[in-house]
């Protein structure tokens, strides 16, 4: 009986030591911190207009949307163009692809901060690392090319001209 109890106590103590060592609750005999605690994290790469534009285009394609137009044609010239990443396209029945694209954006750390619908248009505003992404989907045909979708990222602090605000930002 005494041997069984000694073996049981030893087994429990060994299990406890294994668990606490694995959790970092016990240190080495010299008191040094575990190697993982002293390692510095990798620096986060800059989230530039080009990086944002490439991410949006890639996630839109992965969501099932066709290649998009990234131009600012027809809008006023100015420095504001350096802090905007526009993307727009149209496709027949693009509602599912719009939802899939928003889902992929969320999987890549874009956080939904606003969501609503007005008549035939669905709006989603997302944010990530100093950028707002204004996503729109219109459930009406656009001149026979399909249902329009736009995904436009605007860097925080970017001063858009009034004409561009209407084309890009969420009206709510």
Image: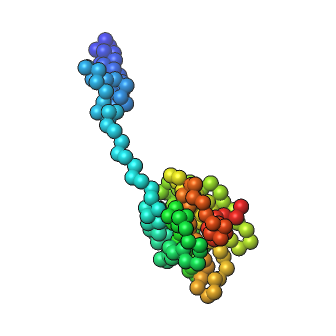
Residue 52 x/y as whole percent: 47, 62
Residue 141 x/y as whole percent: 65, 82
Q: Is residue 122 visible?
A: no
Residue 66, placed above or below residue 18: below
Q: Is residue 116 visible?
A: yes
Residue pushed farthest front? 78
Q: Relative to 46, is 165 on the left or the right?
A: right
Q: Residue at x 34, y 23 (%)?
A: 26
Q: Residue at x 74, y 71 (%)?
A: 119
Q: Relative to 93, is 9 on the left or the right?
A: left
Q: Relative to 29, is 79 on the left or the right?
A: right
Q: Nearer the viewer, residue 33 or 131?
A: 131
What quarter of the picture does the N terminus occupy?
A: top left
Q: Residue at x 66, y 64 (%)?
A: 170
Residue 95, placed above or below residue 29: below
Residue 109 x/y as whole percent: 50, 54
Residue 83, placed above or below residue 15: below
| Quadrant of res 38 | top left
């Amino acid at each position: 009986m005494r041997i069984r109890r000694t073996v049981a106590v030893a087994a429990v103590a060994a299990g406890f030591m294994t668990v606490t060592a694995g959790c970092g609750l016990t240190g080495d005999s010299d008191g040094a911190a575990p190697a993982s605690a002293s390692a510095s994290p990798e620096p986060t790469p800059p989230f530039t207009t080009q990086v944002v534009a490439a991410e949006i285009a890639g996630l839109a394609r992965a969501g099932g949307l066709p290649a998009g137009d990234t131009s600012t044609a027809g809008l006023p010239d100015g420095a504001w163009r350096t802090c905007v990443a526009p993307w727009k396209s149209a496709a027949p029945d693009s509602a599912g692809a719009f939802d899939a694209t928003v889902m992929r954006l969320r999987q890549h750390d874009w956080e939904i901060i606003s969501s609503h619908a007005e008549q035939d248009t669905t709006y989603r505003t997302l944010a990530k690392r100093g950028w707002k992404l204004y996503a729109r989907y219109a459930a009406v045909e656009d001149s026979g090319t399909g249902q329009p979708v736009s995904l436009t990222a605007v860097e925080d602090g970017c001063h858009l001209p009034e004409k561009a605000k209407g084309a890009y930002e969420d009206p709510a």
